[in-house]
Image: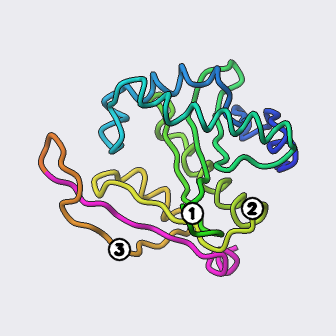
């Protein structure tokens, strides 16, 4: 995959049927719709929420991305949208900075229900991890998820991430309490797995 085209904001092939591109203002409608789906947001500590909360979070990411494109640099928190060849929204993924820890990033991915079970999250996680180590100069990539989110932690494990810890009864949910699982991958582990 061409990092340079991704960095320039171009839509590039993600698979035979999908493409990926840096986030744009027009993508927010699809992102907010996904986050309103209780099947999706049951695994997100920040959802459901009022749309103004999402706008407050994603608006600066879009603005930073637009500014980075003008400067021909990576955005602070590269965030990408995945679509099929018909333009249908198939999810988002990001490799975000960890505050105060240069060289550390967190990988994330959220998919609408119609995109589940197709390997999209695994491919997204692989690409973000590759981008972190090969283009952004990172030395550690981390992630966390709900203990009950089997799909998310299975994706991380498929991508070489190692469980590094767990907070039990961390999240209060409608069903009771759920744990928070922590995963990580160093650059050396990534190179050794390659």
- The residue carrying mark 1 is 159
Q: Which mark is residue 136?
A: 2
Q: Could you give the CA–CA distance between mark 2 and mark 3, rounded to whole angstroms?
A: 26 Å
Q: Could you give the CA–CA distance between mark 2 and mark 1, rounded to whole angstroms?
A: 18 Å
Q: Disc 2 or 1, which lies upstream in sequence?
A: 2
At a point 72% along the width and 40% down the height, the residue shown is 15
Q: Position of residue 127 (x, y in %)?
A: 68, 53
How many residues crowd mark 1 within 10 Å: few (<14), some (14–19), many (20+)? some
Circles 3 and 1 in contact, beta carbons < 8 Å: no
| Quadrant in the picture for the C terminus | bottom right
Circles 2 and 1 in contact, beta carbons < 8 Å: no
Q: Disc 3 or 1, which lies upstream in sequence?
A: 1
Relative to 85, say whether 191 is above or below.
Answer: below
Relative to 191, say whether 124 is above or below.
Answer: above
- The residue carrying mark 3 is 165
- Comparing labels 2 and 3, the label whose residue is closer to the camera: 2
| Residue 107 sits inside the magenta stretch | no
Q: Which mark is residue 78?
A: none
| Residue 87 sits in quarter | top right
């Amino acid at each position: 995959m061409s990092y340079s085209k991704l960095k320039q904001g171009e839509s590039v092939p993600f698979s035979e049927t999908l493409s990926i591109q840096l986030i744009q203002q027009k993508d927010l409608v699809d992102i907010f719709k996904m986050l309103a789906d209780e099947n999706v947001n049951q695994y997100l500590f920040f959802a459901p929420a009022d749309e103004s909360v999402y706008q407050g979070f994603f608006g600066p990411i879009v603005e930073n991305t637009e500014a980075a494109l003008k400067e021909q640099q990576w955005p602070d928190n590269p965030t990408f949208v995945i679509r099929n060849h018909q333009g249908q929204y198939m999810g988002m993924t990001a490799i975000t900075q960890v505050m105060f820890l240069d060289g550390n990033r967190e990988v994330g991915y959220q998919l609408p229900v119609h995109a589940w079970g197709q390997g999209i999250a695994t491919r997204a996680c692989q690409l973000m991890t590759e981008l972190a180590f090969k283009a952004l100069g990172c030395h550690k990539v981390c992630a966390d998820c709900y203990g009950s989110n089997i799909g998310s932690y299975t994706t991380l494990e498929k991508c070489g991430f190692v469980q590094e810890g767990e907070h039990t009864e961390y999240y209060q949910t409608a069903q009771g309490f759920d744990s928070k699982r922590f995963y990580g991958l160093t650059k050396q582990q990534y190179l050794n797995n390659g």
